[in-house]
Image (tube, rainbow, N blue to C red):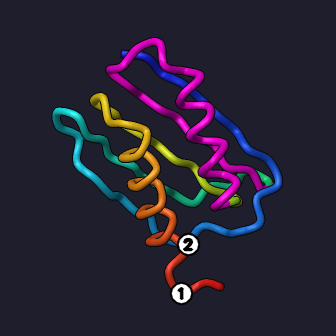
Amino acid sequence: METLTFRFENGSRRNGAQPQLVGVVSSGNLEVLIEPAALNGACEIEVKTAAVGFGAIWQAVMQDFHARWPLADARISINDMGATPAVVSLRLDQAAESALQGQP
């Protein structure tokens, strides 16, 4: 297992009040948990993955996610069992949509 951490400053979209969980950890998939957190407008992401050595790909996927969803005061936990970047992006989008439901 490998643990990767990312932090993005100056988010513009506040996370909702309730934690949101999407996905299921099983062979080839992952789960994403988004929780509100007092981070001075930042978004922190922790990835625990069974696919060791793909840090550069995770960085690119997380940067793309933050460009589309500039979350503020959000902590994201990802548990991965080898999901493809497309599945990671899909699950992150689902979690962000759920967390921001009803917000402009």
Secondary element at tag 2: loop
Q: Is residue 71 positioned above or below 104 on the image? A: above
Q: In the rendered image, which residue does mark 2 sit on? A: 16
Q: Secondary structure at mark 1?
A: loop
Relative side of 34 to 15, left or right: left
The residue sitting at 36% across, 16% down in the picture is 1
In this view, 27 is above or below 37 = above
Q: Nearer the viewer, residue 5 or 84?
A: 84
78 drawn magenta: no
- The residue at 60%/67% (across/down) is 15
Residue at 43%, 17% (x, y): give it. 2
Rendered view: 65 above or below 4: below
- Residues marked 2 and 1 touching at CB (< 8 Å): yes
x and y, in percent, of residue 38 in the image: 69, 55
Q: Which residue is mark 1?
A: 102
Q: Which x, y percent locates residue 42?
A: 74, 50
The extreme top residue here reads: 53
Measured in 3D between alpha carbons, the distance from the residue under mark 2 to the one under mark 1, in whole angstroms, is 9 Å
Q: Say whether residue 60 is magenta.
A: yes
Q: Position of residue 45 (x, y in %)?
A: 57, 40
Q: For the residue marked with disc 1, what is the amino acid?
A: Gly
First to last magenta residue range: 41-69
Query: Along the horizontal axis of the image, is 21 left or right of 76?
Result: left
| Tag nearer the camera, 2 or 1 | 1
Identity of the amino acid at label 2?
Gly
- Towards the viewer: 35 or 86: 86
Are there few (<14), some (14-19), or many (20+) residues within 10 Å of tag 1?
Answer: few
Question: First in sequence: mark 2 or mark 1?
Answer: 2
Q: Residues within 10 Å of mark 2 (few under 14, many from 20)?
A: some
What residue sits 66% from the left and 42% below the top?
Answer: 63
